[in-house]
Image (cartoon, rainbow, N blue to C red):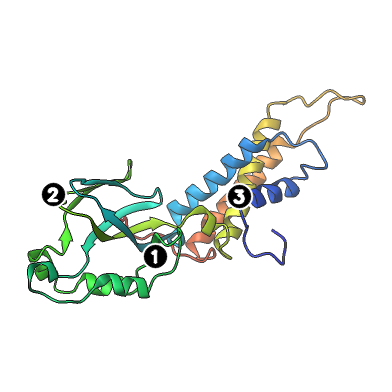
Amino acid sequence: MPQDQIGYKSREDLIKELQLRLADNIVDVELDREHYDVAIDKSIALYRQLSAGSTEESVIFVTTQEAQTEYTLPDEVMEVRRIYRRGIGTNSGGGTNFDPFDVAFNNMYMLQAGQIGGLAVFDAFAQYKETIGRIFGSEYNFLWNRNTKQLKILRNVRHEEEIAIGVYNFIPESILLKDVYASNWLGTYALAQSKLMLGEARSKYVSGLPGAGGAIQLNGEALKSEATVMMDTLKEGIKNFEEGGTPYNFIIG
């Protein structure tokens, strides 16, 4: 990326940079849009697998509907921690007027147009009188399917109600690409993947391409070797926290 630019405005910006760094506008580069998309997808997938900098705890606000027990959550959601109802114990005539929604809204930063927000303080009330909360029905029991992103509430929903869902979620691609640390790692790894694919394509011509002065040797093997070194270096960088996050040391689930 340009030295005066922090992150990428979009995937398109990253693709333009990859093309420039491979001199796609000067020489014939055997990659098309699909190849660049694959390179970026692999970069983001590996970053999410290796770095905790790609995830966060957050809260999603959902309005339940009468008799509806299943809801589809955003694709970024990895795990559901808890489901909180507004007001602990207020519907049962006991408990406390402590409202987790007020705490969450006060501490929230925007991700998806206000649908997902931070949980720095939200977890403080999550532990508040847990036993009392369950007795008075302040939480819903649930089943979560991470593959289909379906959340099933294990209780009859009798009326419309706003609930807060505590989750672990992947930071969306658009946010990662703008991040000062993550964007550099993602861009460099996508470049390495692009070089690897280009090297594999050129390596098919073992004897080179026919030319006026004889066979023209391509740099397929050199590109693959360079790409492998780049990817290994980037993976090692995550272990040293160079991408701004920390490696996973436990599995969420």
Residue tagged by mark 1? 117
Residue tagged by mark 2? 156
Provide the secondary structure element on which disc 2 rests. loop
Residue found at x 22% / y 63%? 84
Up/down of 46 relative to 181, above or below: above
Q: Which of marks 2 and 1 is in front?
A: 2
Q: Quadrant of residue 109?
A: bottom left
Up/down of 35 relative to 188, above or below: above
Callout 3–callout 1 Cβ contact below 8 Å: no
Provide the secondary structure element on which disc 1 rests. strand
Q: Distance between the residues labelled 2 and 3?
A: 43 Å
- Residue 221 x, y percent position in the rendering: 69, 37
Please name whichever residue, 128 or 197, is drawn nearer the observer in this view of the structure.
128
How crowded pointer 3 is (Cα within 10 Å; few <14, some 14-19, many 20+) is rated as some
Please name the amino acid that badge 1 sits on.
Answer: Gly
Residue found at x 38% / y 50%? 74
Q: Which of marks 3 and 1 is in front?
A: 1
Q: In this view, does 47 lie to the left or right of 126?
A: right
